[in-house]
Image (cartoon, rainbow, N blue to C red):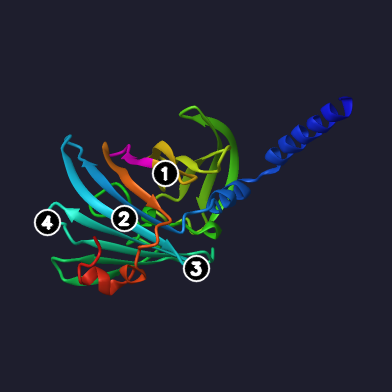
Amino acid sequence: MKRTICTISALLLAGALFAQSLSGYDIMKKSDEVPDPKTSSSTATLTIHSKKGNDRIRKVTMKSKEYGDVSKSVIVFNSPKDVAGTCYLTFDYEDDDKDSDNWLYMPAMKKTRRIASSGSESEGSFMGTDFTYQDMGDRSLNKYDYNLLGEEAIDGVECYKVECISKAHTEKDPRNIVYIAKSDFIMRRCEFYDRQDQLHRILYCTDFTTIDGYTTATMLKMENVQTGTWSLIATENIVYNADDIDDSLFTVAAMEKGRIR
């Protein structure tokens, strides 16, 4: 019995030392490496809340598929009529040094536009929301320096508090503070600070559920604390690892032909 107790104590101590030895980069890398489903399909209601208190509602469909070293995803707007058929296609690469590829198709213009993965264009508002184009994809780990600031509970969940500083120093929000759950390394919140180091936006990840073993936030709210506006993505009808998602959906041609529903 004494040997068993000693062994358990040693394991607990080893676990504590391991946790203490994690750097900010280690935590963000573990978060980045959390397994994703092979495919994902869902619908969502996008609410855009103005400074005057008015709400605009958008209905969207989202699909994604993993292809080894690249993850392809597409968002299509279904309603209202003035934005219906608008699509955003993203290729995110596993290579930390490779930027994502992004395309936006707007039916009214009957034209597909390539969206830069970095720079002022990527930091622009995504379809009039408080999310940017950059927010809609993955961010390269190697573009930031990381500092572990400590630990803090978010919605009752113990989290690592990690500071992420852009190496380029030219971004609109060059410093972020990310809260990563200690239990599963999934982000619970992110604070974005502008070039004057003033809090600019806050991303709240809430209403978590487990679907086929994958912990999923069904509510993503981006609040602009400087303007008083916010945008909320409420996701539903989530299906993971389905076999019926056609590869051809993740193409510019599919967007332009209105094939994605």
Q: Is residue 63 left or right of residue 110?
A: right
Query: Real-space Cα distance between discs 4 and 2?
Result: 19 Å
**Span shown in magenta:** 218-227
Query: Real-space Cα distance between discs 1 and 2?
Result: 25 Å
**Neighbour tally class for label 4: few under 14, some 14-19, many 20 plus, Cα within 10 Å:** few
**Neighbour tally class for label 2: few under 14, some 14-19, many 20 plus, Cα within 10 Å:** many
Can you give x and y, in whole percent of width and height, for residue 164 in the image? 52, 48
Query: Real-space Cα distance between discs 3 and 1?
Result: 23 Å
Residue of label 3: 98
Asked which quadrant contains residue 223, the reply is: top left
First in sequence, mark 1 or 2: give its number.
Answer: 2
Residue of label 2: 62
First in sequence, mark 2 or 3: give its number.
Answer: 2
Q: Nearer the viewer, mark 3 or mark 4?
A: 4
First in sequence, mark 4 or 2: give its number.
Answer: 2
**Neighbour tally class for label 3: few under 14, some 14-19, many 20 plus, Cα within 10 Å:** few
Residue 224 part of the magenta segment: yes
CB under 8 Å between discs 1 and 4: no
Disc on res. 192 = 1
